[in-house]
Image (spheres, rainbow, N blue to C red):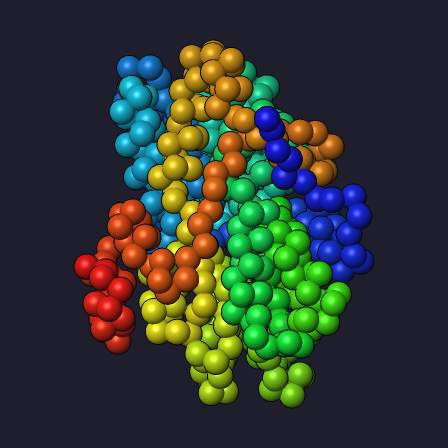
């Protein structure tokens, strides 16, 4: 049975405005994850790719400046899975440059890749690339974020509404004994459909609490480009404007959470104010072990890469029935007014007692997480 990931027809004015922004501003840069990565992506050439007996699958990743995941996790995981399936893997990174994204796509299309996986910078460039590929007879898969107004027949990601619901659930649990607690929401880029879905999921839990008075929303603010520095500055302005009072913060990912925690430290509030996150980064997990961050959301990228490769292999072989069997969910393209066959994977809520799960899964190394001032916490939790 298929489940829909879509914006509901009835939303509050604030939520409706947030969703509208995601559609109106799709030409801006979008960065969706957090952390840092100094790796540089390569560039595509028009030379034939002889890396796989079954042909080559092209993959375009969005950037490295704000997210460690693309080069550290997605790229090697996709390369290995494609190689194991007998395909060459042309995996390139656009470094946040929409023109480079288009140029990389042009090169891959000219080389005749069998399938193109698109982790786009924004919906506008992603949709344009998908249209070019379709004209050339190359199937496309939207990877990690859905291109609104696009034409890809398939989409692979995590259930992003569920991600937001877990964040809302985490904050609600942390504040359950503090009636009337004042909450600030620091959200992701308004041009990122994933950020819209995270916010939607958060509100399924938090809006009833705001309505009842159990929690009080001070302000909800989207942060352009998922810019951590801007997120910290914005949060500080909100905190100052509220007389230095805050009881809980919804931060859409670990990068924004880190920026918020920096401000809380300046005001002697870290460890006293629960902060949410996402991505289970090393920095985020260490902040949880210190008690500065309450929770994060773990999205096993190996599952996402594996699902995308299985879809790509089916499409490369012209096996649409197998592709449809893999894509058991549906996501709604609210701009294109169409349903997109999807693989929506299940995210996991991680608090201090669950950090070990992320390490045991091999997503991060214990030696990276358990360094410095959190060694003792790791020992107590059996993380090694």
Q: Is residue 75 visible?
A: yes
Residue 264 shown left or right of residue 6 in the figure: left
Q: Residue at x 58, y 38 (%)?
A: 146
Q: Nearer the viewer, residue 204 or 253?
A: 204
The quadrant of the picture occupied by the N terminus is: top right
Q: Residue at x 56, y 72 (%)?
A: 175
Q: Is residue 225 visible?
A: no
Res 80 → quadrant? top left
Q: Position of residue 98 (x, y in %)?
A: 54, 44
Residue 296 shown left or right of residue 224 in the figure: left
Res 367 → quadrant? bottom left
Q: Position of residue 185 (x, y in %)?
A: 61, 67
Q: Residue at x 53, y 54 (%)?
A: 166
Q: Nearer the viewer, residue 134 or 194?
A: 194
Q: Position of residue 220 (x, y in %)?
A: 67, 66
* Position of 280 relative to 262 (above/below): above
* Position of 209 relative to 139 (above/below): below
Residue 25 shown left or right of residue 66 in the figure: right
The quadrant of the picture occupied by the C terminus is: bottom left
* Position of 115 relative to 76 (above/below): above
Q: Position of residue 95 (x, y in %)?
A: 44, 48
């Amino acid at each position: 049975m298929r489940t829909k990931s879509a914006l509901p027809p009835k939303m509050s004015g604030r939520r409706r405005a947030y969703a509208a922004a995601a559609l109106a501003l799709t030409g801006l840069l979008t960065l969706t994850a957090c952390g840092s990565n100094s790796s540089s992506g390569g560039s595509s050439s028009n030379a034939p790719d002889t890396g796989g007996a079954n042909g080559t699958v092209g993959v375009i990743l969005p950037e490295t400046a704000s997210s460690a995941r693309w080069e550290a996790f997605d790229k090697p995981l996709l390369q290995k899975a494609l190689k194991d399936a007998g395909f060459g893997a042309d995996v390139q990174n656009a470094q946040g440059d929409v023109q480079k994204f288009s140029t990389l796509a042009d090169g891959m299309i000219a080389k005749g890749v069998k399938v193109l996986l698109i982790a786009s910078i924004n919906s506008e460039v992603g949709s344009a690339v998908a249209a070019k590929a379709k004209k050339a007879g190359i199937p496309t898969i939207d990877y990690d974020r859905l291109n609104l107004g696009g034409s890809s027949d398939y989409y692979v990601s995590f259930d992003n509404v569920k991600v937001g619901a877990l964040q809302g659930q985490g904050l609600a649990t942390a504040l359950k004994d503090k009636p009337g607690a004042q909450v600030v929401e620091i959200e992701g880029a308004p041009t990122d459909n994933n950020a819209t879905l995270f916010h939607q999921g958060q509100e399924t839990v938090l809006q009833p609490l705001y309505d009842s008075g159990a929690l009080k929303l001070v302000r909800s603010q989207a942060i352009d480009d998922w810019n951590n520095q801007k997120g910290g500055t914005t949060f500080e302005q909100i905190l100052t404007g509220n007389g230095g009072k805050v009881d809980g913060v919804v931060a859409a990912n670990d990068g924004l959470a880190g920026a918020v925690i920096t401000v809380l430290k300046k005001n002697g509030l870290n460890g006293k104010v629960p902060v949410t996150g996402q991505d289970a980064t090393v920095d985020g997990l260490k902040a949880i072990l210190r008690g500065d961050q309450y929770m994060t959301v773990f999205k096993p990228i190996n599952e996402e890469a594996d699902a995308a490769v299985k879809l790509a292999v089916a499409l490369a072989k012209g096996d649409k029935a197998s592709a449809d069997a893999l894509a058991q969910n549906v996501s709604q393209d609210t701009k294109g007014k169409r349903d997109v066959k999807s693989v929506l994977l299940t995210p996991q809520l991680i608090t201090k007692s669950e950090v070990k799960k992320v390490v045991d899964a091999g997503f991060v190394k214990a030696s990276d997480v358990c360094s410095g001032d959190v060694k003792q916490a790791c020992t107590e939790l059996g993380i090694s």
